[in-house]
Image (cartoon, rainbow, N blue to C red):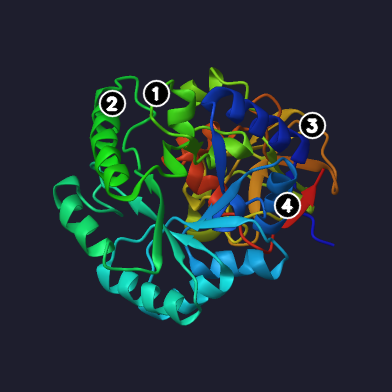
Amino acid sequence: MNRSKAIINTKNIRHNLRIIREKSGTKIIGIVKANGYGTGINEISKVLRDEGVEMLGVPYVHEAQGLREKGDKGEILLTGTLSEDEVEEVINLDLQVCTVNINVLRSLNEAAKCKNKKALLHIFVDTGMNREGVKPHNLEAFIVVLKTFEHLKIVGCLTHLISSDDKDKTQTENQIAEFSNALDKIETAFGKLEYIHTHNSAAIFNEIESPSNFSRPGIAIYGFLPTRELQSKSDLKPSLKLVSEVSLVKHVSKGETVGYSNKYIAKNDITIALIPFGYGHGFPWALSNCGSFSIKNKSCKIVGSVCMDFTMVDISGLDVSVGDEVIIMGDGITGDSIYDISEKANTIPYEIITHLLPRLDREYI
């Protein structure tokens, strides 16, 4: 029996989708990359489809292939880059793409021609991220080349926002304005597009206007937003809880060390509990000697280094027994929230949940 698990509340995910639809006023491309933000891509995708999500988004072909193998027959967008040796699989799996690599698009066009099909392309406009996409000053030349590919059909246009969680919306508004100009050129060349999307989770909840008719929520689906402040203003419900149990209780005398490399030396006699949850499950090593777990509604400080398979916590003064439940991540009232954990680890909420590893059981409620 696995004593450590992630509990995923699918009712909360359904709630969050309804909130996202209301807030965005758009159709949804549900982002389920990185194993559904740690929650389980196949199980969560089924919930999203059941809730009528119009399209799923993943960056890699192998992620889309996994969805198809599990029976997903709906629209899937590859939000990342693509290589030439993947184009036949894109056609076989009936995927939509947004790559701007001309050599890849040429190969994709040929692969579609061989199958007597048309590959569906969303034009990715780089409005400042300097990651994926074609820059606006190269757009007209890009359009000229696209028009030579008879087996590519331009169906969408997107961009990615740099700082949509900021209070100062100037940069985001400038990006949207640049995107809108690019969209006009694209629709002049190819006609009205079916899929127009700029908004990620933060943009949806930061009240940023856009010409979009689709949104691409990721972390919001799972009940979180990039910042504690944005989260506090939303009606989202966290869908993920991490739990374990006490596997051993022992006494540590003053002057003794706990864990690797003498990172903790007991200043007094203490009692510790051994918890079978470590960085090999996805918990940050950075929380060595500074994080905490909740046992019997009490915050118990981590002592010593977080280990691959175990973490030790100080339970001095508590009546704790082997088998007692331990909350690794909760809602901030019972157990540290995702924001408590990410702030202590000096990282972002995304990293906390996407680092959850397969050895951690997932339970869906």
Q: CA distance from mark 1 to mark 2?
A: 8 Å
Q: Which mark is residue 173?
A: 2
Q: Nearer the viewer, residue 353 or 141?
A: 141
| Identity of the residue furthest to the left in this view | 137
Q: CA distance from mark 3 to mark 4?
A: 34 Å
Q: Position of residue 289 (x, y in %)?
A: 52, 43
Mark 4: which amino acid? Lys
Does label 2 or label 3 sit earlier along the sequence? 2
**Residue positioned 49% across, 37% down in the render:** 215
Mark 3: which amino acid? Lys
Q: Position of residue 292 (x, y in %)?
A: 61, 37
**Residue positioned 37% across, 30% down in the render:** 164
Mark 2, Cα crowd under 10 Å, few <14 / some 14-19 / many 20+, is some
Does label 2 or label 4 sit earlier along the sequence? 4
Question: Which residue is denoted by mark 4 in the rendering?
Answer: 46
Q: Nearer the viewer, residue 239 or 153?
A: 153
Quadrant position of residue 54: top right
Q: Disc 3 vs disc 4: Cβ atoms closer than 8 Å?
A: no
Q: Position of residue 277 (x, y in %)?
A: 67, 54
Image quarter in which the C terminus is found? top right
Q: CA distance from mark 2 to mark 4?
A: 34 Å
Count how many numbered circles sit on residues in the image: 4
Q: CA distance from mark 2 to mark 3?
A: 47 Å
Camera-near label (2 vs 3) is 2
Mark 2: which amino acid? Glu
Q: CA distance from mark 3 to mark 1?
A: 42 Å
Q: Disc 1 vs disc 4: Cβ atoms closer than 8 Å?
A: no
Q: CA distance from mark 1 to mark 4?
A: 29 Å
Q: Which mark is residue 296?
A: 3
